[in-house]
């Protein structure tokens, strides 16, 4: 394990793993532990520095709000508290935290003060007095009222007079804002200063080093047993397959399940791609009728996910039974899936939505779970795919959810709805590629809305369905902005869908960010 490493203690923030991602992006190895992991495990990890994450609690709650282990303040290593992490640091070191008169959620402007090692020479612009100003992302309803002994203010604004604090003799820092989210424009520089300059880490952690370590771990874990992998054709399962195949070769069998909820011609493309590029055994199971029957009458999105997930597991169980030495089920689970399902190592996060490939396996499956990408973000997975020499077209393909079009058809899933959506989605993606916008967006897709609207075609009245288009820009998929597609491009896409997809007479464009919306609609 790398000796240059940072430890994140998680207090339940939805952004906790983003901290890990940003530190790794700098080239420093980083892991996340729950805040109550215990002193011995912290000592065993032997970090160069510790970051305390945000969280949904208030430090003044009577029912025992989470606190950082007192041990960390005596280790003699740098500590950075973010949002709740700053508040619990302040409280545990004797200061006062109170409910804020004015909550801050979203963009804010702060003034950097005190010329701290953490914020020195970092600014987005200056004011009339030549003070450095930073654009940051706030998400808090409490604030530090009084500084702990030995601390100074290093950032402030009118709403939050103590937006940053520091005891530089002990190398303790606190930020009320979130440097880990992309909305904080200097956030990566702030974290880089903490990891490299203050903690003294070296930027020597790379994706090739991750491959080497993970291949060795897979070999040691699997030994001579066989692995069955649920292949979707998306980047996550594809990279997982390539990584596992590099480790154990012919011991891997991939199962590609056609659930009737795939994109246009996807089954044929997936089989051809993997036959040509991976050289692994792929079993094709056409279960489209099976899924459609099971989904009949179901409108609740969580129930749809559960039904789809159960059938996938059933099929994997059936296929695994044909492999007498299969002891493992491999999945392309990545960390955003885990976080949003509140299934992370910490079990501290709030559930946003469940993922069919997160949360463990039923006892009846009789397979152990192998998830080599579980601690990686989407952009890290892509870097891993490049390092594994996978084709660019495969690696940089837009994500596709495990439940497929089942979560892009609002309400009940019907074959006719899926057919409408497949055609509309294919037109959307084709035009994005032609216009050079596919690579500019991180994810783009169409959504079927089970509502009808009045239209006019020729001289006749129509009463047909609505399709929504969604395109977002993001690097980590935990936060996202809607993509500003040109109006003429949207017009062309809309005209093609309405003219070419019989049954659709209206197209709308989703301009919601994440948060407050999710990227997928269900």
Image: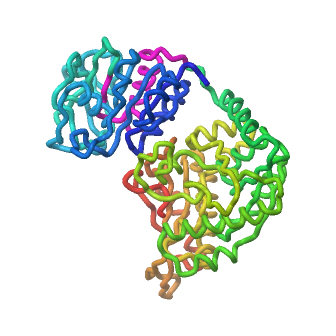
Question: Could you say where residue 412 lies in the image, as x and y percent from the top left?
Answer: 52, 77
Q: Quadrant of residue 282?
A: bottom right
Residue at 52 percent of width and 66 percent of height:
447
Residue at 51 percent of width and 47 percent of height:
336
Residue 128 is inside the magenta segment: no
Asked if 485 appears above or below 148 in the picture, the reply is below
Residue at 21 percent of width and 23 percent of height:
148
Does the rendering let one see residue 403? yes
Q: Quadrant of the N terminus?
A: top right
Q: Quadrant of residue 170?
A: top left
Residue at 61 percent of width and 73 percent of height:
418
Q: Is residue 488 left or right of residue 166?
A: right
Q: Magenta region: which residues?
A: 173-202
Q: Is residue 228 left or right of residue 70?
A: right
Asked if 55 appears above or below 229 in the picture, the reply is above
Does the rendering let one see residue 473? no
Q: Quadrant of residue 131?
A: top left
Q: Residue furthest left?
A: 101
């Amino acid at each position: 394990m790398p000796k240059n490493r940072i430890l994140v203690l998680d207090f339940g923030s939805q952004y906790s793993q983003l901290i890990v991602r940003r530190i790794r992006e700098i080239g420093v190895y980083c892991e996340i532990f729950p805040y109550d992991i215990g002193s011995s495990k912290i000592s065993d990890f032997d970090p160069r520095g510790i970051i305390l994450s945000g969280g949904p609690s208030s430090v003044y709650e009577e029912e025992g709000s989470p606190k950082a282990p007192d041990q960390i303040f005596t280790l003699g290593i740098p500590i950075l508290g973010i949002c709740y992490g700053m508040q619990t640091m302040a409280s545990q070191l004797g200061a006062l935290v109170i409910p804020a008169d004015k909550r801050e959620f979203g963009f804010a402007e702060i003034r950097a003060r005190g010329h701290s090692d953490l914020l020195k020479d970092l600014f987005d612009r200056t004011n009339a007095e030549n003070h450095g100003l930073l654009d940051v992302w706030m998400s808090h309803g409490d604030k530090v009222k009084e500084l702990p002994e030995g601390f100074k203010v290093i950032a402030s604004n009118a709403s939050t007079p103590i937006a940053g604090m520091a005891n530089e003799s002990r190398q303790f820092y606190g930020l009320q804002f979130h440097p880990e989210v992309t909305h904080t424009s200097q956030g990566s520089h702030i974290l880089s200063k903490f990891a490299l300059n203050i903690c003294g880490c070296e930027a020597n952690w790379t994706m090739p080093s991750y491959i080497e370590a993970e291949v060795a771990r897979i070999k040691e874990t699997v030994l001579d047993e066989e692995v069955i992998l649920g292949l979707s054709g998306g980047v996550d399962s594809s990279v997982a397959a390539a990584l596992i195949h590099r480790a154990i070769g012919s011991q891997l069998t991939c199962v590609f399940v056609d659930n009737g909820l795939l994109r246009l011609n996807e089954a044929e493309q997936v089989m051809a791609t993997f036959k040509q590029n991976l050289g692994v055994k792929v079993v094709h199971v056409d279960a489209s009728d099976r899924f459609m029957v099971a989904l009949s009458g179901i409108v609740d999105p969580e129930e749809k996910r559960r039904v789809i997930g159960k059938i996938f597991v059933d099929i994997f169980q059936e296929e695994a039974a044909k492999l007498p030495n299969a002891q493992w089920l491999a999945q392309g689970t990545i960390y955003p899936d885990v976080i949003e399902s509140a299934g992370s190592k910490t079990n501290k996060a709030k559930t946003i939505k469940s993922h069919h490939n997160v949360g463990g396996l039923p006892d009846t499956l009789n397979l152990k779970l192998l998830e080599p990408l579980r601690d990686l973000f989407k952009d890290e997975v892509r870097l891993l795919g490049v390092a594994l020499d996978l084709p660019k077209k495969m690696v940089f393909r837009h994500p596709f959810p495990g439940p497929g079009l089942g979560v892009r058809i609002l309400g009940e899933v019907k074959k006719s709805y899926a057919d409408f959506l497949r055609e509309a989605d294919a037109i959307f993606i084709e035009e994005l590629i032609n216009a050079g916008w596919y690579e500019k967006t991180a994810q783009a897709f169409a959504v079927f809305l089970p509502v009808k609207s009045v239209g006019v075609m020729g001289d006749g009245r129509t009463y047909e369905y609505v399709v929504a288009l969604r395109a977002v820009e993001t690097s980590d998929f935990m936060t996202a902005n809607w993509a500003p597609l040109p109006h003429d491009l949207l017009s062309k896409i809309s005209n093609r869908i309405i003219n070419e997809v019989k049954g659709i007479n209206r197209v709308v464009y989703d301009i919601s960010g994440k948060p407050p919306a999710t990227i997928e609609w269900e």
